Image (cartoon, grey):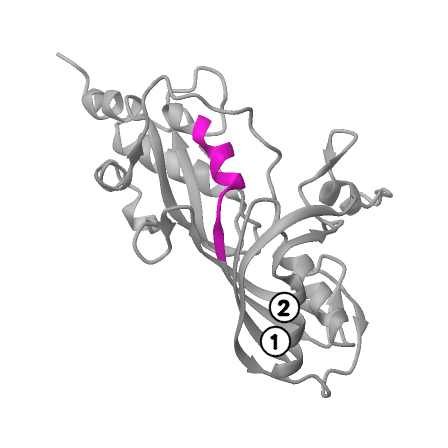
Amino acid sequence: MAPPGSSSLSRLQSLHGIFAVYKKQGPTSADVLNALKEALLKEAGVQNPNPRKRKKQSLKMGHGALDSAASGVLVVGIGNGTKMLSRMLTGSKVYEAVGELGKATDTLDATGKVVLERDYEHVTSLDLEDKLKTFTGDIMQVPPLYSALKQDGQRLSVLLKKGHQVEPKPARRVTVSRLRLTEFKPPLFTLDIECGGGFYVRTLVDDLGKAVSSCAHVKQLVRTQQGQFTLQHHALQEQQWTLQDVLRSLQPCSQGAPGAPPEPPEDV
C-alpha cells in the first residue's frame, strides 16, 4: 500500500508550467517561493519539509523577480516551467507606483535613507504629465546602485550594505509602452506603468523628480500584471497555495519545453 499523501506528491512532481502568486510587501521573492513549496509539500504529506535544502529536492520550482519592498504578481515556474521564467523576465509588466516628491533616498524607494530634500510646491500635475512624455517609448535608463545587478559576482545592493564601493552600470535601452499620471495629491503622485524587461520604476521616479526641478522616491509599488497573469484574476493568495488551486491556475508546458539560459534577476 502506498504511504499517505504519496499520490498527491507524485501529482505535484508531475506538474510542468507557470502560475502566479501574490507577494506581499516585505519578504523577498525567494522567501515567498520557500513558503509556497513548504505549503505544497506539507499538503502532499512530506513531513517537516525544508524547501531551502537543494540536495535531493523533491519539488523543482523557481520564481521571477520582484523587490522585497514591492507587492503584487510574482510568477512561479514548476518542473520544466522553470525554463519559461527567463522569457517572463523580458516580457511585459504593469505597475502602479506611488511616488513622493521632495525627498530622495539612497535606494530610490522608502526603504532607504533620505539623502536630499527639495521644494516641490511649484510642481503641478501638468508639469508631471508633460515630463512623462520624455520617458515613454524606447529610452535609455541607468540602473540604480541598489539593485540585483552584480559586480565581481555579488549583487550591488549587498556590496553597498557591506560598505564597499560600486561602479554605476552604464545606461541601457528599455521600453515603456504606457505611462500615465492617475492621481496627484502633493507630495504624492500615482503612475500607471507598462514596461518591458530590465526597466526600473525606482529610477523612473527619481529621474522624474529631477525633471520637475525637485526630487522624488518610490513610496509604494504594486505589480498588477506580468505577461498574461493579472493581480485581480490570477495571483494566488496565501490561503490558495494548495495543489487544487495550482492545478486550476497552471499554464502548462511540454516536458521538453526549450528554455533560454536564465537572465540576471531584475529589480523594480
Provide the residue span drawn in magenta. Answer: 83-94
The residue under label 2 is: 133
Task: Say which residue appears at 61% left-offset and 82% top-offset.
Answer: 125
User: Foreground residue, 17 or 115?
Assistant: 17
Question: How far is the residue under mark 2 from the one under mark 1?
Answer: 7 Å
User: Foreground residue, 121 or 152?
Assistant: 121
Mark 2 and mark 1 residues within 8 Å of each other at the beta carbon = yes
Percent position of residue 198, x then y: 61, 45
Q: Secondary structure at mark 2?
A: helix
Percent position of residue 143, x then y: 72, 49
Please indicate whether residue 149 sits to the left or right of residue 252 in the image.
Answer: right
User: Foreground residue, 209 or 164?
Assistant: 209
**Which residue is the extreme one toward the bottom?**
121
User: Foreground residue, 258 or 216?
Assistant: 258
Residue 131 quadrant: bottom right
Amino acid at pointer 2: Lys
Answer above or below: position of 265 versus 137: above
Residue 101 quadrant: bottom right
Amino acid at pointer 1: Glu
Task: Say which residue appears at 26% left-offset and 28% top-offset.
Answer: 44
Asked whether residue 165 is drawn in magenta, I would say no
The residue under label 1 is: 129
Residue 229 in view of the camera? yes
Q: Residues within 10 Å of mark 2 (few under 14, many from 20)?
A: few
